[in-house]
Image: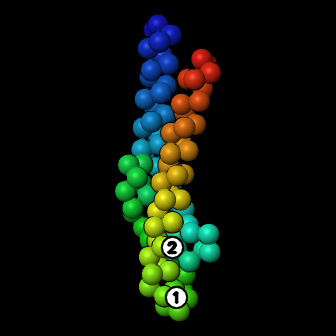
Amino acid sequence: MPPELDQARLLLEAMERIRAGHYAGSDPAGLVRVTVDGDGMVSAVRFRDTVGRYDPRAVEVAVRMAVTSAQDALAAAYSGIAEPMEDGT
C-alpha cells in the first residue's frame, strides 16, 4: 500500500476512535459536569447536589462553561491527530 494511503487509513481510524468516544468538561467551580459525544453533542449533564442554592443565572453560565469545556476536550482530541500530520510524520 502506498504510504499516502496508509497515512490516510491511519487518520480515518483515529477519527473514528474520536467519534466513538465521550468527552467530559466542567465549569471552574465544579457545579456542573457535562459529557459530549464524538460529534460534540451533549449526552449527559450532572449537577452538584447543592445546585439549588445558586442563582439560576449562575447555573446557566456554569452549564455553558461546562459544555464549552467538554467540547474543548473533543477539539483537543482532534488536534492531537492533526499535529503529527503538520510535523510531516
- Spot occupied by residue 11 in the image (x, y as percentages of width and height): 47, 27
> Which residue carries the number 1 mark?
54
For the residue labelled by badge 1, is the local secondary structure a helix, a strand or a loop? loop
Is 2 placed above or below 55 here?
Answer: above
Q: Secondary structure at mark 2?
A: helix
Residue 67 seen in render? yes
Viewer-closest of 43 and 52: 52
Determine the residue positioned at 46% across, 7% down. Answer: 2
For disc 2, the neighbor class at 10 Å (few under 14, some 14 to 19, many from 20) is many
Q: For the residue marked with disc 1, what is the amino acid?
A: Tyr
User: Do tag 2 and tag 1 residues touch (Cβ < 8 Å)?
Assistant: yes
28 left or right of 56 in image: right
Residue beneath the point at 50% across and 80% down: 58
- In the image, is residue 77 above or below residue 4? below
* Residue 27, quarter of the rendered image: bottom right
Display colour scheme? rainbow
Image quadrant containing the N terminus? top left
Locate the C terminus and report the quarter of the image it occupies. top right
Q: Nearer the viewer, residue 42 or 56?
A: 56
Residue located farthest toward the bottom when viewing the structure as drawn: 53
Q: Is residue 56 above or below residue 79?
A: below
Q: Name the residue: 48% across, 73% down.
A: 61
Residue assigned mark 2:
62
The picture places residue 14, in percent across and down from the top left corner, at 49, 34
User: Observer-nearest residue: 65 or 40?
Assistant: 65
Asked if residue 84 lies left or right of residue 57, the reply is right
What residue is shown at x 58% (from left), y 37% (from top)?
A: 80
Q: Amino acid at mark 2?
A: Ala
Residue 46, can we see it? no
What whole-number distance in Å separates the C-alpha atoms at marks 2 and 1? 10 Å
